[in-house]
Image (cartoon, grey):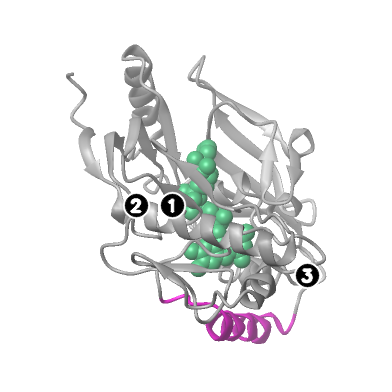
């Protein structure tokens, strides 16, 4: 099948996700402009290909059998800008901008979103889709608190439509109501006062805590399971003696039991089998069902 030269075929996906696993994308595009994204989507539609969107791949498990159709990676659409309006700092970020870039703009004004964004991997659109957030009781602690609107490229019209945050159904690690489409830009807003004078110290403290408690130097997708409140998944898994347990090249982290880490050569099926083993063991020990926080993508 002929495709435009900016679309590539049979692309290995291991470097496109933080677990470093998965097969090939049938086709992959990393658009460097909105126009290029529109052209790629129009081409995929003409060929009747399904679409799979990837941010930084820090919350997905990509199948070893690969991903059907066109994979769209938005990392190159990454500009961020800010301005002040009506006593608020407004931050507008293209979908592929990293959370760290947005953090810097809030930090310049010593505003508390900088603290919540500390240590959150992935890009801005991925943060919106997953309503990413932190466990600590901070304000803000989830994306839904800072997002004002999202610009969505509609698949039917290939036009951009703005969806206001109030029309999005936000819940724990999920956002609904903006679909179907590709999030291309996100508008965030936070009051310019009060400032947070000690924010740099708090950011350093939060970073130290993450380094201490999480295996951030090993490939992972962060927390694997949602916490079945009031219980914590990590404590339940650790209680079953599963810390360090491995299948193939996937292991329940020895540092934090709710993280699964992989080593060189790991397969997505190693991760998937370990996920299922942990679920079965926790169910038989504690009678509790654990539900994954990450998203399965590709041919499962
Ligand atoms: C070490 C580590 C620590 C982590 N800590 C946390 C944490 O504290 N809190 C937390 O909430 N998460 C955490 N995570 C998980 C993850 O980083 C977040 O969920 C993040 O927001 C996902 O962003 P991403 O760009 O990687 O999205 P991806 O993983 O690439 O995608 C996630 C989902 O969004 C969809 N998607 C992505 N971009 C778009 C778009 N532009 N339009 C439409 N759909 C799109 C994808 O199809 C997929 O379904 C952690 C991960 C790691 C590896």
Q: In the displayed structure, does residue 66 sit left or right of residue 74?
A: left
Q: In which quarter of the image is the C terminus?
A: top left
Residue 102 image point, x, y percent? 56, 60
Q: Looking at this view, is 283 or 238 the one in front?
A: 283
* Contact between labelled residues 2 and 1, with CB atoms less than 8 Å apart: yes
Residue matched to label 3: 138
Does residue 80 show up magenta in the picture? no
Residue at the (33%, 49%) spot, across then down: 22
Closer mark to the observer between disc 3 and disc 2: 2
Disc 3 to disc 2, C-alpha distance: 31 Å
Residue matched to label 1: 57
Q: Tell me the SS state at disc 3.
A: loop
Residue 16: numbered disc: 2
Tell whether circle 3 marks a residue whose Cβ is less than 8 angstroms from ligand 1.
no
Dot 1 surroundings within 10 Å: few (below 14), some, or many (20 or more)?
Answer: many
The magenta region covers: 197-217
Residue at the (62%, 47%) spot, across then down: 128
Dot 3 surroundings within 10 Å: few (below 14), some, or many (20 or more)?
Answer: few
Tell whether circle 1 marks a residue whose Cβ is less than 8 angstroms from ligand 1.
yes
Residue 142 image point, x, y percent? 71, 57
Pointer 3 or 2: first along the chain: 2
Residue 143 image point, x, y percent? 68, 53
Q: Tell me the SS state at disc 1.
A: loop
Res 105 visible: no
Q: In the displayed structure, does residue 36 sit left or right of residue 115?
A: left
Res 257 visible: yes
Pointer 1 or 2: first along the chain: 2
Q: Tell me the SS state at disc 2.
A: helix
């Amino acid at each position: 099948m002929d495709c435009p030269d900016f679309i590539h075929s049979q692309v290995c996906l291991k470097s496109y996700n933080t677990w470093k696993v998965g097969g090939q994308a049938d086709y992959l595009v990393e658009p460097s402009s909105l126009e290029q994204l529109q052209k790629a989507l129009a081409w995929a539609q003409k060929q009747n290909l399904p679409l799979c969107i990837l941010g930084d791949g820090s919350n997905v498990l990509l199948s070893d059998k690969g991903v059907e159709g066109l994979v769209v990676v938005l990392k190159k659409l990454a500009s961020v800008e800010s301005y002040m309006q009506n006593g608020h700092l407004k931050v507008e970020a293209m979908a592929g901008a990293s959370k760290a870039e947005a953090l810097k703009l809030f930090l310049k004004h010593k505003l508390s979103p900088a603290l919540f964004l500390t240590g959150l991997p992935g890009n801005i659109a991925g943060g919106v889709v997953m309503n990413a957030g932190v466990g600590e009781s901070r304000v803000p602690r989830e994306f839904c608190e800072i997002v004002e609107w999202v610009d969505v490229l509609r698949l039917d019209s290939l036009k951009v439509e703005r969806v206001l945050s109030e029309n999005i159904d936000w819940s724990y690690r999920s956002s609904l109501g903006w679909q179907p489409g590709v999030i291309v830009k996100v508008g965030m807003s936070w009051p310019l006062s009060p400032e947070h004078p000690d924010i740099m110290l708090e950011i350093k403290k939060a970073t130290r805590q993450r380094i201490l408690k999480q295996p951030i130097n090993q490939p992972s997708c962060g927390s694997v399971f949602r916490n079945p409140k009031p219980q914590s998944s990590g404590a339940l898994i650790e209680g079953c003696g599963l810390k360090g347990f491995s299948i193939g090249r996937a292991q329940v982290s020895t540092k934090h039991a709710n993280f699964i880490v992989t080593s060189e050569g790991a397969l997505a099926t190693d991760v998937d089998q370990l996920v299922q083993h942990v679920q079965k063991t926790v169910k038989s020990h504690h009678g509790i069902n654990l539900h994954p926080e990450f998203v399965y993508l590709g041919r499962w």
